[in-house]
């Protein structure tokens, strides 16, 4: 990919490895400070589905972003998480990660992709809309992730 890291070096997208776990935990906590995935959940997802966790690595081998999806089940997949380190946002990395994971899911037999997003997360909703994701017509599902944690569900036909 053509994006440059903060130090000016090239960035690359690759599948996660076991050694990346603590860095993915850190990225997830930075992206979702109020509600990060517990360490053990990321551990189990990484172990079970390493092919579906892509990371952005800079020239110093630091991880700067990640996307996590589920393998297809009944031809359906979910994007579980997406995060870009704050200093590298708005440079096309989120779009690049989504494009890469959607291509992988398509190749693996996914026909529809779902995700949930906090309704006020305008940047994420704009990104997903620009990729063709469509929100459920009834609007956000109330208390989807617990009391007060409403989420907009969006889907994309591949
Ligand atoms: C959402 C997030 C992943 C976007 O990553 P990014 O690398 O900054 O996004 P990109 O640069 O690829 O932008 C792609 C599109 O997203 C939208 N977008 C991204 N940031 C935006 C912002 N601050 N305001 C408005 N739209 C924005 C735009 O449509 C943009 O396209 P454009 O640049 O052609 O206008 C990033 O902001 C992030 O990590 N946020 C915290 C974690 C999070 O909310 N994850 C999603 C949870 S569902």
Image (cartoon, helix red, strand yellow):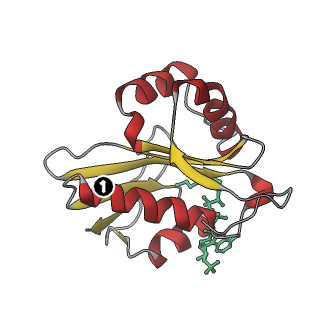
- Location of residue 77 in the rendering, given as x and y in whole percent from the top left corner: 28, 50
**Helix, strand or loop for disc 1:** helix
Question: Considering only vertical position in the picture, is 11 above or below 146?
Answer: below
- The residue tagged 1 is 105
Q: Residue at x 22, y 56 (%)?
A: 110
Question: Considering only vertical position in the picture, is 138 above or below 149?
Answer: below
- Location of residue 140 in the rendering, given as x and y in whole percent from the top left corner: 42, 61
Residue 149 in sight in this render: no
Q: Viewer-proximal residue, 19 or 113?
A: 19
Residue 80 quadrant: top left
Q: Residue at x 72, y 40 (%)?
A: 61
Q: Residue at x 52, y 59 (%)?
A: 97
Q: Which quarter of the figure is the N terminus placed in?
A: bottom right
Residue 28 quadrant: top right
- Location of residue 102 in the rendering, given as x and y in whole percent from the top left corner: 37, 61
Count the marks: 1
Residue 158 in sight in this render: yes
**Image quarter for ligand 1:** bottom right
Q: Which quarter of the figure is the C terminus placed in?
A: bottom left
Question: Considering only vertical position in the picture, is 140 above or below 38?
Answer: below
Q: Residue at x 45, y 29 (%)?
A: 46
Answer with left or right where residue 52 lies relative to residue 39.
Answer: left
Residue that protrudes farthest toward the right in the picture: 7
Residue that protrudes farthest toward the left in the picture: 74
The reply to whether the residue tagged 1 has its Cβ within 8 angstroms of ligand 1 is no
Q: Residues within 10 Å of mark 1 (few under 14, many from 20)?
A: many
Q: Viewer-proximal residue, 113 or 54?
A: 54
Q: Viewer-proximal residue, 110 or 149?
A: 110
Residue that protrudes farthest toward the top in the picture: 40
- Location of residue 137 in the rendering, given as x and y in whole percent from the top left corner: 31, 72
């Amino acid at each position: 990919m053509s994006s440059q890291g903060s130090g000016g070096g090239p960035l690359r997208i690759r599948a996660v490895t076991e050694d990346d776990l603590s860095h993915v935990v850190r990225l997830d906590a930075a992206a979702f400070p109020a509600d990060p995935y517990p360490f053990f959940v990321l551990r189990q997802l990484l172990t079970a589905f390493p092919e579906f966790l892509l990371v952005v690595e800079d020239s110093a081998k630091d991880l700067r972003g990640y996307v996590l999806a589920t393998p297809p089940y009944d031809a359906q997949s979910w994007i579980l998480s997406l995060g870009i380190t704050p200093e590298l946002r708005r440079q096309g990395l989120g779009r690049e990660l989504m494009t890469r994971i959607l291509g992988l899911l398509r190749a693996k037999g996914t026909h529809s992709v779902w995700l949930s997003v906090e309704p006020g997360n305008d940047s994420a909703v704009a990104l997903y809309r620009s990729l063709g994701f469509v929100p459920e017509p009834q609007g956000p599902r109330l208390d989807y992730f617990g009391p007060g944690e409403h989420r907009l569900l969006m889907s994309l036909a591949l």
